[in-house]
Structures are given as C-alpha cells and as structure tokens.
Image (tube, helix red, strand yellow):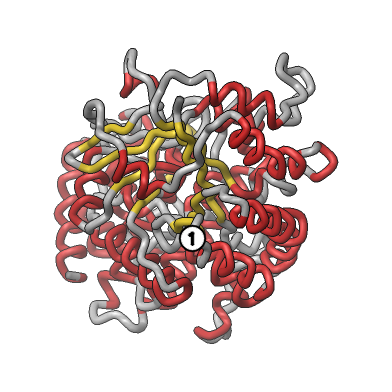
Amino acid sequence: MADICIGFEVHQPYRLNRQFSPVPEKKKDGLFDLYFDGLNKEILLRVADKCYNPATKIILEKLDEGFSCAFSLSGIVIEQLQKWSPDTLSLFEQVANHRNCELIGQTYYHSIASCFSDKTEFHDQVSQHGDLIHDLFNQRPAIFENTEFTFNNDIATMIRDMGFHGIFTEGVDRILGWRSPDFLYTCQDLPVMLRNTTLSDDIAFRFSNRTWEQYPLTADTYASWVAASSGEIINVFLDYETFGEHFWEETGIFNFLRHLPDELRNRNITTVLPSRVVADHVPVGTIDVHETISWADIEKDTSAWMGNERQRTAFHAVQSARPYATDLQIWRYLQTSDHFYYMASKYGSSGEVHTYFSHHEAEDAFKTFMRVLSDYESRNIRLMKNKKSATSLRVLSPELAFHFAGPTGFIGYAAYNLDQFEELLCIVPEESIRYHQGRGDFVNWITDALEEPRLAERISGLFERHEIVKIIKQRREQLWSNLK
C-alpha cells in the first residue's frame, strides 16, 4: 500500500496599487506605499481569519495525533504575517517546530526568477528564503519546491548543487509517458517527487463542484482512493488557501481536513514527510525535462505567466531591470509570479481560474505593472554611473511606448524600450516600417521618448529593415556595455 506525502503552499503577494500614478516628490522610504495596494493588509487579515487560523489549528491537533505534513511558506507571506498578523505566524511557528512537520524551501519572493537567463537572482532568492526559515524556525529546508512547481533540467541541476536533497514538481503526463507519478524519480541526479495531479486537484478544484460525479467528496471516499493506488508514494500538494478561502467553511472543507488523517490511518495509510520519502524510497527511473513544466493551468507549463505578448513584455522588462535595481527589495517584489498571472488572457477552465484569482483585469494589470516598473527605473537613474545610457535603455510607461501601426491602424505590437523596439523591427510588416518612417514616427519617438537624437538622425530617411535594425542594434549594444 502506498504512503502519502501531503504538502501545503502558503503564499500571498504584495499586489500592485491599481490607482498608481507617479508622484515625483515621493521619497524612497515611501515607495512601497506608492507602488503596492493598501488592500494587501485587508486581504491578508481576511485570509488569516478564514483559512490560516482555523486550518492551522486543525493541523496542530492532527500533528499531535500522528499526522505528518509539509509546509512551504513564501518569504513575503511571512513578512505580511509579521507586520499584520503575528498571532497567525505564531501558529505556523508551532507547526514548524512539531516533529511531524517539515518546512520546504522556495524562492523568497515566490518569483519567476528561475526563468531568467542568468540564474544568479534565482540562486540568491533561494538562499534568502533558506536563511529566513533558519532564522525564524531554526531549521534549514532540505527539500525544495519552485514557484508553482516550475521545473526543468537546469533547475534540477542548480537545486542539487545548492545542497537540497530533493524537489517537488508536477506529475505531467508528457514527461512520464506510461509511468505513474506515484513513485520516486530522479532528474540530473536529484530525487524528484511528483505531485499526483488528479488526487491533488480533487481537493483543490473539484471539492465543491456540484456537477462533479463524485460530489460531495468525503474524507473516507478520498482515503479509499489513496488506498487503491498501486504506487509507492502519493504526493498531494495544495494551496493552503484551499481551506476556508477558496472553499468556504460552509462547503465542509474543514470537516474534510479534520477527518482525513483519521480515515487514512483507518486504512493503514502512513503520512510521511518529504525527507523521509527521499531517504526511504529508491528511485524507479529518471525524468528528462527540457521544456519547463509547472502545476499551472491545463497546459502545465509557463504559459500562466508568459503565455501572451503582455506577459512576455513584462517578463523581459523586469529581467533587464537588474542594473537599475539600486533597491533590490522592490525589484524582487516585482518578480512575484502573481503579477504576471494577472495579465493572462486564457479562456475555458484555465481562464476561469485566472479570473477568480486576479487582482484586476489583464490589460489593467499589465499597464499598472509597466507604470510601476518605469517609475522605479526612472527614479534610480540618478544613482547610476552612466545616466545617459540608463535613460536611453529604461522601460517606458504605456503612455510613452511605441505602438506599431500601418495605414489601417494599430497592428498589435508595442515597444516599451529600445531592446523591444529592435526585436519588433525584425518581425513587423515592411509596410509598417515604411508607414512610420514616412511620417517621421521612429525619429520622433527615439528623440523624445528615448532621448537619443543622434540615433534618430542616423536612421532618418532609411526605409530598408536591415539597415535600420543594424544601426539600432549597434547603438543598443553600446549603451548596454556602458552599464556593465
């Protein structure tokens, strides 16, 4: 009979201020309140009242009775609990200190840094989170779970080299083929625990769905499904907010949580900690993950955060903002995956989930993010050595972006900095280039928005794509070399 390893992810982002507009006279110590929404405190206290407090009290009771489980708390949810709900943090400290609980590592900012081409930032955030857990709970995580289970071979290699003993990720069919997720595997010589998607989502998404043929889901029914597994270890990992926040108390979700440990024990199913899984089980095979996977949406990839042009623009913009990051903390807050999740434009069941979790409409989320990032970079230019190059390469607000058009109107592409302008020049239709050059649009934008009059003069009158791109590229590379 299979054992079961149950983990909970606890995270709340610092949501951006939906009414943000630049306030030049605002000092550095006031930027957090300018950039981030005052509702964050209200939301955190609501989630603590509806989920964290009642669910954790149940967990503490069950831990005393022999139940085991793991928790992964992001650094920024811990920050919010320290500021606004210390009694709730005290409950998590009791859980963390219990012999039947294990804390899991993740990135401090629950960020998309593992997707950056340079993995230094990812490494630093993992280390920062480990230091926080050690300082606060007196333990060093041995097992890791990346943001939303984002995973590939490179991530496995880095986490292995950082000394972790194992990692969680999603049991995605396309990497398993005919194999079951209910065994231990390895990737790049790192033990990998695969989430059982079906059994996890039976709780996380289907629990209160009255159209589901298994509704209502009870603890004894669920335990019987676990008992019927032919594997060795079933990994169930959930957003902790499932209990009381996503599914309100009236759905019976707390009764389910309260009775599940007893029903598992009645069937001789042992709940085990992740470190014991790695120590006690022999891997049955290897997985090879070239294309990044995650637990998000139907696609189980990175499209939840980088699936449309808005998201990719924001992703590349925040990644390239490192030279401007004289205040690392705010830059890192802007890397939190939730900001990009809110920009998604999916349909069907995935779209419904995004809509449920999103702070505001996708287009508004994108514009707010770019306005904040633009303001952040602009403020820090005065502290940089090469202010001229930094000004020309900075991210622009939506109002200053260059929107490519043709004789019939906007064609769907917009450049928010010189990097993206060069990239889009390579793919927009020739008629768009001729249209803009004939009107002097490129020259005016480069002169006024980028403050590069000499570059504008060099491309003035050119209509061949390759000639314009060559000059832009040369200047862009020169500017970046000035910032190194």
Q: Tell me if 168 is positioned left or right of 36 in this view.
A: left
Side (left or right) of 395 relative to 226:
left
Q: Position of residue 193 (x, y in %)?
A: 36, 37
Q: Amino acid at mark 1?
A: Arg
Against 448, residue 352 (above or below) is above
Which of these two is toward me, 50 or 261? Answer: 261
For the C terminus, the quadrant is bottom left
The residue located at (77%, 41%) in the rendering is 255
Vertical placement of 24 versus 254: above or below?
below
Residue 414 in the image: above or below residue 372: above
Task: Tell me if residue 425 can be seen.
Answer: no
Number of other residues with Cα within 10 Å of mark 1, as a class: few under 14, some 14 to 19, many 20 or more = few
| Viewer-closest of 303 and 388 | 303
- Where is residue 218, by image quadrant? top right
Residue at 33% x, 13% y is 178
Could you tell me which quadrant the N terminus lies in? top left
x then y, percent, for residue 176: 32, 21
Residue that numbered label 1 is attached to: 99
